[in-house]
Amino acid sequence: MLVGGAWLHVRHPEVWPWVLGAAVAVAAVSLARGFPWNIDRPEERLYAAVGTLTGGAWLTAATVLGPSCDPLPLLLLAATVAFGVPWWTHRRRRARVRVDRAIQAWPDVAESIGLAGSRVMSAVVDVWGWRARLHLANGQSVADVLNRVPAIESGLGTRPGAVRVEADPAHAGRIVMRVLATDPHAGAIPWRGPSVQSIADPIELGVFEDAANVRISLLRKHILIGGTTDAGKSGVLNVILGNLAACRDVVLWGVDLKGGMELRPWASCLARLATTPAEAAALLQDGVRVLDARAEAMSRAGARVWEPTPKTPALVIVVDEYAELVEQAAGAVESAESIARRGRAVATTLLAANQRPTQKSMGGGALRSQMSVRICLRVRERRDVDLILDRGLLAAGWHAHTLDAPGKFYVLGDGHTQPRRARGYLVTDDDVQATAARYADSRPQLDDLSEKALEEVIEGEVISPPEITLQMALRDAPGDGLSVQELMHLTGMRRTWIYDRLQQYVQDGRAAQVARGRWRAAPDD
């Protein structure tokens, strides 16, 4: 009202008769027919008509005099309170009435669905519905209630999928039941950007149904993301990458055997990107070499853990569609399992995404058992819940097969041991481009110890594997040379790394710029 009054006063002060006329017309229709508010009770119609007329009168005065003219600001505040309190009180009262009716009907509902003897201990109205604490009869457990959730929804007259059941951690004979009148995750939740600047801080992955943020720690944790096609794996992966890109104490490597379709947009923030089986095997083998070098240095220094800093960053290796790695680069699986077993202490983390992480698609059960954080999106078959999370969790209420929208997930890990539904943030392509461009030039390099572990001696020259690829690409380049984008694709390295090497090669006489933005090896004398 304040903003609208200010805009009308400045731009169209002459329309005040139309504003007043519209308010009177809407108030008259509201009182007579309840339109456009869809209300039937006479007292509610009167409330809507008086509120509309009061607001229209204030907006008319603000259009003529300006919203800051005394006493209009005070009148606006008084009217907001006067009309807001009854509306809020009325909604709370109606919600309490619905809950009271449900509590009174519970003994009959419980009797009809096989939970006779259970009783409601307390109930509270919340933003999305209500929640109740139930005491079960002797011999009943949370598993019995979970098996009867559809029957509970039918008995209470709710919409399908409205009831949530959680175990009471303090008592095996008690449960917490939540009834959601509306789905808080019906719409996508826009991503607000990175929430951390260090890998030591938990990142915000999404929002639970009670509006609490989903926070997970990635430091010294291996992460498994599972879910069927179009379940939202890319969205969850982008949230994680977006947060890690903002961290100055972590180096990112990526493996994407779908030609870089998923990870290529983040290439400017990835120190290395492997898109072929050979590159993937070399990258993971280099990860083991970094791990070994750090472990040896820590052993000599008597240290137990590697503390990430901008000068000694953590290493996170992201593998999209891990099943493709198992099929196309079987030799890389041993390296990945070695990283999963030994990487925590030296801050070398593996993040694997897979549609259906069976024992076969994960190259055996060794790697999956090392994943301490599990994120389960929608699955096609009920048994897939136990594949992604852990055996027995389907029966415990982790019903990922019932998730009904992309981005909805369950998370299992430290601090997340209850089957609580969440929805991940929506990261658009524009968000990815903007975030990657913002942090591309501030990404850290590996520490000297790790870089030295990756060096090789070829014909008396110390050189890293990506640099070997760069030199071979320049040597085999066509007459019009290769672009920086093509060199990034071939080496899997960032733009700044390519430019630094090209400038050094030009100074050494080993490369030449044959056209604007195109390079090849310098011709031999």
Image: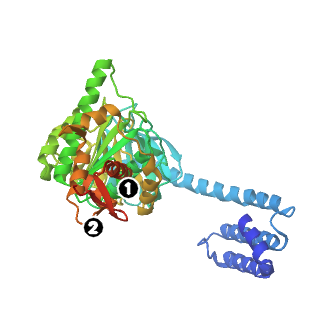
Which percent across, then down, holds residue 334? Answer: 15, 39
Residue with the mark numbered 2: 480
Q: Nearer the viewer, residue 335 or 504?
A: 504
Residue 136 drawn above or below residue 300: below
Q: Nearer the viewer, residue 341 or 449?
A: 449
In this rendering, would 127 be left or right of 292?
right
The amino acid on which the numbered mark 1 sits, given as a three-letter code, is: Glu
| Residue 71 in view here | yes
How many marks on residues?
2
| Residue 208 in view here | no
Q: Nearer the viewer, mark 2 or mark 1?
A: 2
Q: Nearer the viewer, residue 401 or 292?
A: 292
Which percent across, then down, holds residue 72? Answer: 83, 63
For label 2, the crowd category at 10 Å Cα-Cα, with few meaning under 14, some 14 to 19 and many 20 or more, is: few
Residue with the mark numbered 1: 153
The amino acid on which the numbered mark 2 sits, given as a three-letter code, is: Asp
In this rendering, would 189 be left or right of 33?
left
Q: Based on the displayed image, in which of its 4 quarters is residue 338 positioned?
A: top left
Which percent across, then down, holds residue 281? Answer: 18, 46
